[in-house]
Image (cartoon, helix red, strand yellow):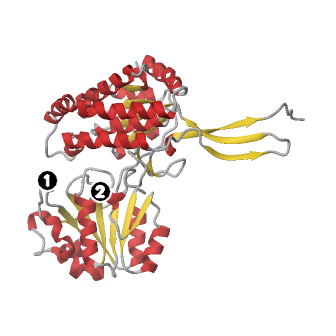
């Protein structure tokens, strides 16, 4: 039972209402320093989690922390501290004919629950953003990252305690299904739940929640190589989108290629076959035409004939599919039918095709001559993100500070009464 934790988080959220933006920013900077000071302890806890996971598991990279990654997390936290406060902003204002002033003002949600899987970096990202946005946070991490999350939350609690603030501003819930169920049913205690993870997790949260949910959807991302694409550009974009970090949601899953580019497909895909540094070679599941174009030009042990289930699949690994289309319109139709509404890209020098693709593809982020790897709150200038929303209500795309606030109307008068 987590009723006490839920009630404590609600009570703690009220303490934030009296904190100034300067106090919150100071706390975040202190947390950044504390994370770096506790690097050894956090990495030791992370090593325990890693020892329980097969290194070949596609989630291993998501789970892995290093001194470099912890420093980046700390710097992201400092970056959040440097951003303008999203609270107290007057979104609109009007004076009614009777002299009454109505202001629409940004305010905190109150208590935000975030459910995530084997990504311990999310713990700090989520806490820093929620704190900056004036909300207490309930963290429901996966069992794979249990030790890492506990070690990180201990550091957060130390900083909160040092500043005379309740530890319940950051509550790490038990990593069992029962805690998830209780949080999803905590009407009146939890104002918003955000799931981050697999399609299975997101579907479960959406189907079982009684509290409001913002979906951060699975990323099934495509890059379309048009008949007029620049080949070097296409090759660089595909390589970056697939191999930068295959386990994240903005990673490329399927290349859609115009049939006129099949003679050039081997050239475009060549870099994918070469393992470089910590990057592995990419397994390609190609449809029949693409398979024929690559056969003899791409390593046989990395090339397979695609099956139907390879299309519309989020691989989260050094694997991708290739689908051949007869025309630009066929490419549009294919992507529209298989997109998860996350991130989609077109590589083309045909401006008319590019503009139509950007207009008609229904995704949170649509790119022209760029890899889908750019879908990231920090890269968009938002600071550390809380997730990528694939829905259309309230928030869409990289979600940061403005998306985790709500608003209220403040109405000021001088005794006016309604007839």
Few, some or many residues within 10 Å of mark 1 (<14, 14–19, 20+): few
Residue picked out by circle 2 = 251
Is 136 drawn above or below residue 162 in the view shown?
below
Give the left or right position of residue 361, taking residue 324 as reference: right
| Res. 157 image quadrant | top left
In this rendering, the count of numbered labels is: 2
Question: Residue 283 location, x and y as percent?
Answer: 17, 61
Q: Which sits earlier in the primary sequence, circle 1 or circle 2?
A: 2
Left or right: 99 in relation to 210 = right
Which structural element holds mark 1? loop
- Helix, strand or loop status at disc 2: loop
Q: Residue at x 24, y 44 (%)?
A: 62
Q: Which of the labelled discs sits on residue 278, or is there none?
A: 1
Image coordinates of residue 218 in percent, x first then y, are: 36, 50
The nearer-to-camera label among 1 and 2 is: 1
Q: Position of residue 256 (x, y in %)?
A: 31, 70
Please say whether residue 66 is visible from this viewpoint. Answer: no
Compared to residue 319, the image places residue 266 above or below, namely: below
Please report the residue visible at 42 percent of the width from the left and 43 percent of the height from the top: 82
Give the image quarter of residue 181: top left
- Give how far across and how far down residue 380 sits, in percent: 41, 55
Q: Residue, x 16% and y 68% (percent of image)?
A: 271
Front position in the image: 321 or 275? 275
């Amino acid at each position: 039972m987590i009723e006490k934790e839920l009630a404590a988080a609600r009570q703690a959220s009220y303490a934030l209402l009296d904190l100034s933006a300067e106090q919150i920013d100071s706390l975040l900077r202190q947390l950044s320093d504390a994370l770096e000071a506790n690097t050894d302890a956090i990495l030791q806890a992370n090593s325990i989690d890693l020892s329980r996971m097969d290194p070949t598991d596609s989630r291993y990279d998501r789970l892995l922390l290093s001194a470099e990654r912890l420093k980046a997390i700390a710097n992201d936290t400092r970056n959040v501290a440097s951003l303008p406060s999203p609270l107290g902003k007057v979104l609109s204002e009007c004076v009614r004919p009777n002299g009454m002033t109505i202001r629409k003002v940004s305010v905190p949600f109150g208590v935000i629950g975030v459910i995530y899987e084997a990504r311990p970096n999310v713990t700090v990202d989520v806490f820093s953003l929620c704190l900056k946005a004036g909300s207490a946070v309930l963290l429901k991490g996966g069992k794979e990252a249990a030790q890492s999350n506990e070690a990180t939350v201990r550091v957060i609690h130390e900083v909160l305690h040092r500043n005379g603030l309740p530890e319940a501003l950051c509550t790490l819930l038990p990593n069992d299904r029962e805690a998830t169920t209780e949080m999803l049913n905590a009407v009146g205690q939890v104002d918003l739940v955000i799931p981050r993870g697999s399609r299975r997790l997101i579907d479960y949260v959406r189907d079982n929640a009684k509290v409001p949910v913002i979906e951060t959807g699975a990323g099934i991302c495509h890059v379309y190589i048009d008949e007029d694409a620049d080949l070097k550009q296409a090759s660089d974009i595909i390589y970056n989108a697939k191999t930068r970090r295959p386990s994240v949601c903005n990673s490329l899953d399927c290349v859609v290629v115009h049939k006129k580019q099949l003679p050039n497909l081997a050239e475009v895909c060549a870099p994918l076959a070469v393992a470089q540094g910590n990057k592995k070679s990419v397994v390609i599941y190609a449809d029949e035409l693409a398979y024929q174009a690559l056969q003899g030009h791409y390593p046989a042990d990395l090339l397979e004939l695609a099956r139907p289930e390879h299309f519309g699949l989020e691989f989260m690994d050094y694997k991708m599919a290739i689908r051949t289309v007869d025309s630009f319109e066929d490419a549009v139709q294919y992507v529209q039918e298989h997109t998860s509404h996350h991130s989609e890209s077109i590589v083309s020098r045909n401006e008319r095709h590019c503009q139509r693709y950007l207009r008609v593809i229904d995704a949170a982020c649509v790119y022209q001559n760029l890899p889908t790897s750019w879908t990231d709150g920090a890269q968009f200038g938002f600071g550390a993100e809380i997730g990528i929303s694939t829905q259309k209500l309230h928030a869409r795309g990289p979600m940061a500070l403005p998306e985790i606030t709500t608003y209220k109307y403040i109405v000021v008068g001088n005794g006016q009464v309604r007839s």
